[in-house]
Amino acid sequence: MAFGFDVSGFHRESCPARAGAMTSLLDQPYRGGFAGPEHRFALTVYFEDTDTAGIVYYANYLKFMERARSDMLRAAGIDQRAALEAGTGVYAVAEANIRYLRPAKLGDDLLIRSRVEQVRAASVIIHQRVMRGAEQLTDGRVTAAFLTVDGRPTRQPKEWTDIFQRIMTQEEHA
Amino acid sequence: MAFGFDVSGFHRESCPARAGAMTSLLDQPYRGGFAGPEHRFALTVYFEDTDTAGIVYYANYLKFMERARSDMLRAAGIDQRAALEAGTGVYAVAEANIRYLRPAKLGDDLLIRSRVEQVRAASVIIHQRVMRGAEQLTDGRVTAAFLTVDGRPTRQPKEWTDIFQRIMTQEEHA
Amino acid sequence: MAFGFDVSGFHRESCPARAGAMTSLLDQPYRGGFAGPEHRFALTVYFEDTDTAGIVYYANYLKFMERARSDMLRAAGIDQRAALEAGTGVYAVAEANIRYLRPAKLGDDLLIRSRVEQVRAASVIIHQRVMRGAEQLTDGRVTAAFLTVDGRPTRQPKEWTDIFQRIMTQEEHA
Amino acid sequence: MAFGFDVSGFHRESCPARAGAMTSLLDQPYRGGFAGPEHRFALTVYFEDTDTAGIVYYANYLKFMERARSDMLRAAGIDQRAALEAGTGVYAVAEANIRYLRPAKLGDDLLIRSRVEQVRAASVIIHQRVMRGAEQLTDGRVTAAFLTVDGRPTRQPKEWTDIFQRIMTQEEHA
C-alpha cells in the first residue's frame, strides 16, 4: 500500500539523515506525525499555559489539542491555510468534550495522542488524549465540522475524507 | 427569605443610585449577577478572542465561561483567591462539554447565562450558555471539582454547598 | 463645542437613568469612556490572565491595553470591524514599549488610563497606564499603524485623525 | 574551555544519533539551543496565535519570545520551575520593547533568535528577533528581573550570572 502522506512514524523534517550545518536542526520547528493510525504531537508547558493555581489552565488543553489536529492535517497532506485562502472552507469545532484527570505543570513534557474516530460527509470526530509519560492527563473528543468561509456546513473535499478513511485503517504501530 | 448574597439582579456596584463624580462609573469593572437562579455575565469580543477564520477561537469560550463562573462565585460570596491563599483549596475543572452552535465575531456583545445544575460534596456542575441577543451560540456544561492546594479532591466548605443549594432553589426571575 | 462622540465621562449604556427590568443592567457589557482627554477602562483579573508565578502574565497586559484601545475607538465613533469588513483598513501595532512596575494578581480590579499622545497621517501613539487604585502597575506606549487589508501602511481616514485631534485637545477633567 | 551546558548547536534530545523505536522521535518535544552566543528557537503559527485581521495577534509575539527565553535558560542549565518551587525566586519581565516590522500568518514557520545583551546583579537584558526565513518580523528587547517569590527584586544566583557571562562571550557560530 502506498500513501500520499507519511504514516511511518519517522520525523523526517526535523531529523534529516545527515545534517549539513548543525544549526539547521535547531531552525526546524517541531512536527508530529503518525505511528500507524495514531498521530503523536509533543510539546512543553510554558508560563503562558499555566495559571495562578500552579497548573495548566483548562482552556489551554484545547489549544494543545488544536495544535495536534492542525499538525495531523498537515502530516496527512491537508493544507488548512490554502483551503481558507482559496475560499474552499475551514474546519470549525462543533463539539468538544474533555475530562481532566491530572494537572500538568510548568516545564512538563506532554504528548498528544490523536485518532480519527469517525468520518462523516461534513465532519470528523477526533479522539485526543494528553499524556505525560505513561500518565494520562486528559481525555477528549472533538467534532470538527467543515464550513464554507461564510460559515455554513458543507461537505469536506472527497480527497480529504479518503485520507481520513486511510488513516483509520492503518495497522497499529508495534 | 434572606440571603447573604445578592440575587436580586440589581447591579449595585457599577450603577450607584446617584453618581458623585461621573468618572467613578467608568472606573468600576463590570460585575454580573443573579436574576433568580440564573447568573448573567456580559462581555464584548475583542481582537484577542478571534482567530484568522474571522470568528472567536473555540478555546476562548472556555475563558468566557470561567469569567462567568468566577463572577458567579464572587456574587455568591465565595472568595476563590482568599481560599487559594489560605490553603483551603481551589476549584479545578474536572469535565467540560461544549457544543458550538453559531460563531461569535469581533465586537459582538455576548451574555453568558449560567445555572448551578447539581451540587455534590466535592464538585458542582454548572450549565452555561453563551448568547448573542436571542441567539444561542454555545451550550456547555462544566464540572468543577474542589481540590486541596496540592491537587487532591476534597469536600467543598459546607457553607459553599449551602450557597449553591440556595441558588438552585431561587424562584425564576419574571 | 459639540462632539460627535461622548466625552462626558458618563457611562450611558450600562447605567440608564431608569432601569426597566433590572436584569437589563446585567446584560450590558462594560464600556469605558472618556473623562476629558483621558480614556478609562476598568477590568477584573481572571484565572486566564495569571500564570504559575501567581501574577498576571506579562503578555496579557497587552491584551488589557488593546481592549482599552478598542473601547476608546468605539467610544470615539470609530468602528474597527466595519472598517475591516468594508476593506478600508485595520490598525496594527507597529511598536509597543512597556515597563512593568508592580504585578497584578487574581481578582484585582484594574483601570487602564489611555491618552492619545501623537497623531500622524498613518499612525497614532497612545500612552497607556494600568492602575490598581492609586498604584501604577505598568507604563506603556503603543504606536498603532493603519494598514490596508493586505497589510500596507496607509493614511487613516481624515475623519478619524480629526477625532484624535479633538480628543487630545479636550480639557482636563476636574 | 569546557562548559556545563551545550552551546554546540546540536540538538541532541530530539535527534539521537540512532533512533531505537522511530516513534520515540515524535515523542520528544522541540528544544532550541545555542549556535555560538545566539539562542535559536523555532515554532509554527497555529490558529490560537492569529486574530481576525488574519495575522498573529501582537501580544502573542511576547509568548513566542518567552518560550524562547525559557528554552534558553533550560539549555543553559537554569531550572526556573525548581527555583520557583524551592523558593529561590523567579524571573519577571521588568521592561519589554518591541517593534513589529512584518506580520506572521497561520502556518508560518518562525525562528526566534535571542542574545544575552547585558547582565546585571538582579536582571538580564535579552535581545530577541522573530524571523521568517531571512525576513525579520519583529525586533524586541526584554529586561528580566529576578524576584523573590513574594515579588521583591533580588540578586540572581552567582552561578547564573556566570552562565550569562559565558554565553555572551561565546564565539560567533560560523
Image (spheres, coloured by chain):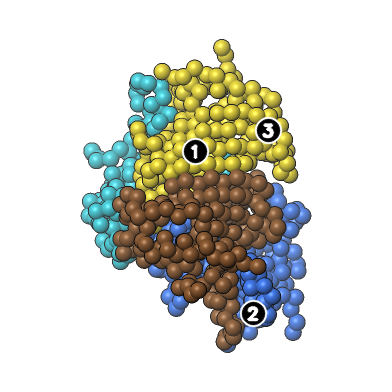
Chain colours: A brown, B yellow, C cyan, D blue
Q: Of B154 and A174, which appears nearest the observer?
A: A174
- Kind of residue at badge 2: Phe
Determine which residue is flagged by label 3. B122
Outermost front residue: A1
Q: Which chain's residue wears label 2? A: D
Point out residue B74 in the picture as x, y percentages from the top left corner. Answer: 57, 31
Question: Which quadrant holds residue A48?
Answer: bottom right
Q: Residues within 10 Å of mark 2 (few under 14, many from 20)?
A: many
- Kind of residue at badge 3: Ala
Which badge, 1 or 3, comes first in the chain's sequence?
Answer: 3
Q: Secondary structure at mark 3?
A: loop
Q: Nearer the viewer, mark 2 or mark 1?
A: 1
Determine which residue is flagged by label 2. D10
Whether residue A97 is visible: yes
Left or right: where A69 falls relative to C114: right
Q: Secondary structure at mark 2?
A: loop
Decide: is D77 above or below A15. Answer: above
Residue drawn where x is 71% and y is 38% of the image:
B153
Point out residue A119 in the picture as x, y percentages from the top left corner. Answer: 45, 55
